[in-house]
Image: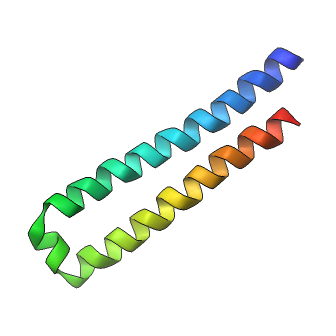
Amino acid sequence: MILLVALLSGLGLFLGVLAGLAGLILGSIFVVSPFVLLSAGGLALQVLNFLFLFISTIAGGFLGLLSFI
């Protein structure tokens, strides 16, 4: 039972980190491309990406804590 809880918390944290890394990679691609950055759509994508990174990191940590309790 304890092993299962530890596995679930690890999985939650891993998914959160993975989602955060994916967001970070996407963000760096958008930053590198000046054309995307200059457009209003690029700015909106950056904001959405940051929100996704923020939410996924918190969700991953929260899932990890929740499954640990």
Depicted 18 relative to depicted 6: above or below: below
- From this viewpoint, which residue is outermost toward the left? 35
- Indicate the quadrant where residue 36 lies: bottom left
Question: Residue shown at 15%/58% (left/top)?
Answer: 32
- From this viewpoint, which residue is outermost toward the bottom? 40
- Quarter of the figure with the C terminus: top right
Name the side, left or right, on which 68 lies relative to 59. right
Name the side, left or right, on which 14 lies relative to 47. right
| Nearest the eye: 39 or 32 | 32
Q: Residue 25: image x %, image y %?
A: 31, 48
Identify the image's colour scheme: rainbow, by chain, secondary structure or one colour. Answer: rainbow
- Quarter of the figure with the N terminus: top right
Name the side, left or right, on which 8 lies relative to 54. right
Q: Residue 45: image x %, image y %?
A: 33, 71
Q: Residue 2: image x %, image y %?
A: 87, 18
Depicted 37 relative to depicted 18: above or below: below
Q: Residue 60: image x %, image y %?
A: 64, 45
- Indicate the quadrant where residue 63 lies: top right
Question: Residue shown at 67%/45% (left/top)?
Answer: 61
Count of labels shown? 0
Question: Residue shown at 73%/48% (left/top)?
Answer: 62
Question: Residue shown at 17%/81% (left/top)?
Answer: 39
